[in-house]
Image (cartoon, grey):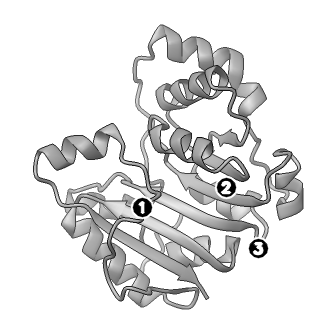
Amino acid sequence: MQKDVSHIRSFVIRQTRMSEYQRRSFETLYQGYSLLCDDEKSTRKQILSAFPGCDRLVAEIGFGMGEATLELAEKFPETAFLGIEVHKPGIGKLLGELASRSITNVRVIREDAMVVFERMLAPAVLDGVHVFFPDPWPKKRHHKRRLVRHGFTAMVGRALRPGAYAYLTTDVRDYAEHMLEVIGTDDEFFENPSGGFCEPLSWRPRTAFERKGLARSHEIFEIFLKRR
């Protein structure tokens, strides 16, 4: 029998120092750029009402320091981006950049992504989900904490509209192969057009984290899925 690990968090909150810029941005801007996650599921119309002029809705799980989020938000101003992150330094950095660039099509949710998908999002609300370089939890005893695990595709799939997409990347081969295994096991919601890993899509930004990995000859693995 498959052990239920859906309640196990894919992250650990650590006491991380924030720069003065990050701290000030978080304290002064969070309320204006955030959405609350409560137990009442929000419809597509309700969420998009927070984004005047937007007609598409994409969630990014674990946006780190927000580089990809910022670039995509500027590139696609008619797409609303839900940035899901728990770590304050990255949230503070993103908020400061959103304000300085007058970007209005991003909202931040400081919560466990699984809680967001289970409690906040009604079925078929999203046009896309990005999972760019999630924590690989490399030690075997920690694999149960990996975000992409048994139940992940059902969780994400329910929130996506038919024809929507999920885009996953990692620079850890073991995790990449694990992702394909999970997707192959739980294929009720998704099809994999490439049949395995795919080439990078032209619109996906490269972050400083990714560039450092490439400089160290890390291989990047990409998976692009379509919602059935």
Which is more toward the observer, 224 or 170? 224
Residue 123: image tag: 3
Q: Residue furthest top?
A: 20
Whether residue 106 appears in this view of the structure is: yes
Mark 1 sits on what residue?
202
> Is 196 situated left or right of 139 in this image?
right
Q: Position of residue 199 (x, y in %)?
A: 32, 71
Mark pair 2, 1: CA separation: 29 Å
The quadrant where residue 220 appears: bottom left
Q: Nearer the viewer, residue 202 or 150?
A: 202
Q: Residue at x 47, y 44 (%)?
A: 68
Residue 3 vs residue 117: left or right?
left
Decide: few, some or many residues near mark 1? Use Cα within 10 Å; few <14, some 14-19, many ≥20: few
Q: Quadrant of residue 198?
A: bottom left
Q: Residue at x 57, y 25 (%)?
A: 97
Which residue is labeled 2 in the image?
A: 116
Q: CA distance from mark 2 to mark 3?
A: 12 Å
- Amino acid under disc 1: Ser
Quarter in which the C terminus is drawn? bottom right
Which part of the image, by quadrant, shows the N terminus? bottom left
x%, y% of residue 34? 73, 36
Q: Amino acid at mark 2?
A: Val
Give the vertical position of 139 relative to 180 (above or below): above
Q: Is residue 183 above or below residue 14?
A: below
Q: Nearer the viewer, residue 13 or 223?
A: 223
Q: Amino acid at mark 3?
A: Pro
